Image (cartoon, rainbow, N blue to C red):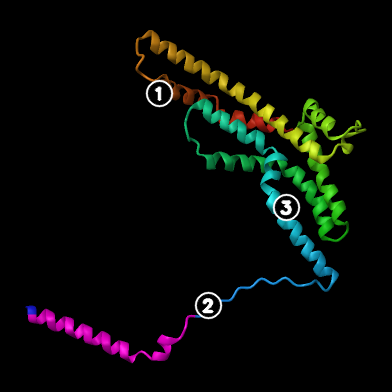
Amino acid sequence: MNRFCFRKKFLILLGLVCLFLLVPLSIMAAPLPVPQIGIGVGAAETPQEVALSLQILALLTILTLAPAILILMTSFTRIIVVFSFLRNALATQQMPPNQVLVGLALFLTFFVMAPVWAEVNQNALQPYLAEEITQEDAFEKALNPLREFMFKQTREKDLALFVNLATDTKPDGPEDIPIYAVIPAFAISELKTAFQIGFLIYVPFIIIDMVVASTLMSMGMMMLPPMMISLPFKLLLFILVDGWHLVVQSLLAGFY
C-alpha cells in the first residue's frame, strides 16, 4: 500500500515537471501589460474650449458645495431634526436606523423642492445650456426661486438680525438683501421651527412615561425600569394615531 502511494505521488510530480518544461520560456518571461493613465493640462486654443473648461470648473465647485446647499438652503434641516426628535421621544434607540431617516428626509426634500428646482431648470439651466443667457444671468435666475422659498420660511426677526449686521443701510425690498444674509437667517428659522415641532411631539410620550413611572412606584416595583414598560405603550399610541402620516403631513403642510 505504501509502495502504491509513493508511485502515485512520483507520477504526479513527474507530470508537473514535464508540463513546466513544455511551457515556452518566452511566455513565462513576458511582462504583464500595465495600462497607462495620464491627465494632461494644456492651453485652450478656441473659445469653445475655454467655455467648456469654465463649465467643468463650475460643476466641480457646485459638487463640492452640494451638501451644504442641500442642508442649509432646502427643507432638509427641518425634516431631519424633527425625525431625530421623534426617534428620541419614542426611545427606540437606533430604530429606525439613521440610513432610513436620512433617506426619507432626502426624498421628502426632493418632493418639497421639486417646484423650485423645476423653475430653476426652466428659467436658468436650460436657457444657459442653449446659450441664450450668460452665466451671470443664469446664476441670478437660479437664485431667485431659492430666495423666494427661503423668504417664505424665514422669520422677520432672524432676517433682520443678519441684515442689520451685513448692511448699514436699510434695504428697499427683498431683492436688495444679500444672499449671504438670507441663508443663515433661513437656517436658524428652520432650526427653531424644528425644535417647536419636536417639543409638541415629546409631550404625549412624556405623559406616558410619567404615568407608567407613577404606577410602578405605587405598586412598589422600583427595580423595574419604567422605560421598558412605557415603550410598548408609546409604540401602540404612535401606531393607533398613524404617527408617521401625521408627522409627514405636518412637515409638508408647513412648506405650502
At label 2, counting other C-alpha atoms closer than 10 Å, the crowd grade (few under 14, some 14-19, many 20 or more) is few
Residue type at mark 1: give it. Answer: Met
Please say if the residues under marks 2 and 1 sit with CB atoms less than 8 Å apart: no
Looking at this rendering, what residue extends furthest in the top direction?
A: 218
**Pointer 3: residues within 10 angstroms few (<14), some, or many (20+)?**
few
The part of the chain drawn in magenta is: 3-32
Query: Residue sitting at 77 percent across and 65 percent down?
Result: 53
Seen at 52% across and 15% down, the residue is 207
Sequence order check, earlier mark of 2 and 1: 2
Q: Is residue 112 visible?
A: no
Disc nearest the viewer among 2 and 1: 2
Cα separation, mark 1 vs mark 3, equals: 47 Å
Q: Could you tell which of marks 1 and 3 lies nearer the N-terminus?
A: 3
Look at mark 3 in the image and give the residue it sits on.
Answer: 62
Q: CA distance from mark 2 to mark 1?
A: 61 Å
Q: Amino acid at mark 3?
A: Ile
Q: Residue at x 77, y 31 (%)?
A: 154
Is residue 30 visible to us here? yes
Instruction: Identify the image quadrant of the N terminus.
Output: bottom left
Q: Which mark is residue 228?
A: 1
Q: Position of residue 190 (x, y in %)?
A: 70, 31
Task: Reply above or below: 135 against 183.
Answer: below
Q: Nearer the viewer, residue 144 or 115?
A: 144
Q: What residue did someone put label 2 on?
A: 34
x and y, in percent, of residue 151 in the image? 80, 34
Question: Reading the chain from its start, which is encountered first: label 3 or label 2?
Answer: 2
Whether residue 8 appears in magenta in the rendering, the answer is yes
SS at badge 2: loop
Mark-to-mark CA distance, 3 and 2? 35 Å
